[in-house]
Amino acid sequence: GAVVSQHPSRVICKSGTSVKIECRSLDFQATTMFWYRQFPKKSLMLMATSNEGSKATYEQGVEKDKFLINHASLTLSTLTVTSAHPEDSSFYICSARGVGLQGAEAFFGQGTRLTVV
Amino acid sequence: DAKTTQPNSMESNEEEPVHLPCNHSTISGTDYIHWYRQLPSQGPEYVIHGLTSNVNNRMASLAIAEDRKSSTLILHRATLRDAAVYYCILRDNSGYALNFGKGTSLLVTP
């Protein structure tokens, strides 16, 4: 199946700094990427949908100025957590949907565990 | 999106079959039934999906009720590596994001 790679897999940052998480589709072109957040022992919550070359669409309650999403190419989307605070500590997961991929399955990255201290 | 209901947790012995149920009484005619699983500290992975007929693949089987209001994911021989949270999700083929519920946490014991 198609491969989606996230980097870094885990990151620790100081409160007030910004962190960038990359999501790459390695063997297909991703026209749409989805960003999720998952708190401990909770389910995945959709944060935003990004389409290549256009602005991301954010879910209700997600601050677009805090969680900056850039989808500048068909193989890369980035999520930047700006001015991070301890409550932003979470597991962030991206998912990609591509052009011409067979089947209806979605492909997910391995996730990024963010800890803000 | 139509809602799904799954048990919070289930337990199985290794090498025995596991039947994970999912109720979706408000499913619409265009909704596919998808199953994903999430191993600890990893992103979800696709397991199987179907519309009306039962489906088999190398990972599992999906049994869909005739009225489509419920389905069952079948793992034929559980292994320790199958311990994960299993999500039953309804989605049409529009390509919008998957909406995850709470899923079923499967514990596999040796």
Image (spheres, grey):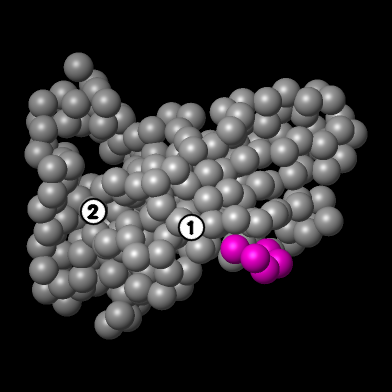
Residue B4 can be seen, yes or no: no
Q: Where is residue B16 in the image (x, y as percent from the top left)?
A: 10, 31
Q: Mark 2 points at which residue?
A: B48
Looking at the picture, does residue B65 appear above or below residue A5? below
Residue B80 can be seen, yes or no: yes
Residue nearest the observer in this picture, A44 or A75:
A75
Query: Quadrant of the rendered structure where residue B8 is?
Result: top left
Span colored in magenta: A52-57
Looking at the picture, does residue B31 appear above or below residue A74? below
Q: Position of residue B18 (x, y in %)?
A: 16, 39
Task: Describe residue B4's horizontal placement relative to residue A74 as left or right.
Answer: left
Which amino acid, mark 1? Ala
Task: Describe residue B22's horizontal placement relative to residue B103 as left or right.
Answer: left
Looking at the picture, does residue A77 appear above or below residue A98? above
Residue nearest the observer in this picture, B70 or B95:
B95
Does residue A103 show up magenta in the picture? no
Q: Are marks 2 and 1 on the same chain?
A: no
Task: Describe residue A5's horizontal placement relative to residue A51 as left or right.
Answer: left
Q: Using the image, name the chain to which the residue with label 1 belongs.
A: A
Q: Using the image, name the chain to which the residue with label 2 belongs.
A: B
Q: Residue at x 76, y 52 (%)?
A: A68
Secondary structure beneath label 2: strand
Q: Residue at x 70, y 67 (%)?
A: A55
Other-residue count near label 2 (Cα within 10 Å), few / some / many at <14 / 14–19 / ≥20: many
Which of the labelled discs sits on residue A30, or is there none? 1
Q: In which quarter of the image is the C terminus of chain B?
A: top left
Q: Residue at x 10, y 53 (%)?
A: B56
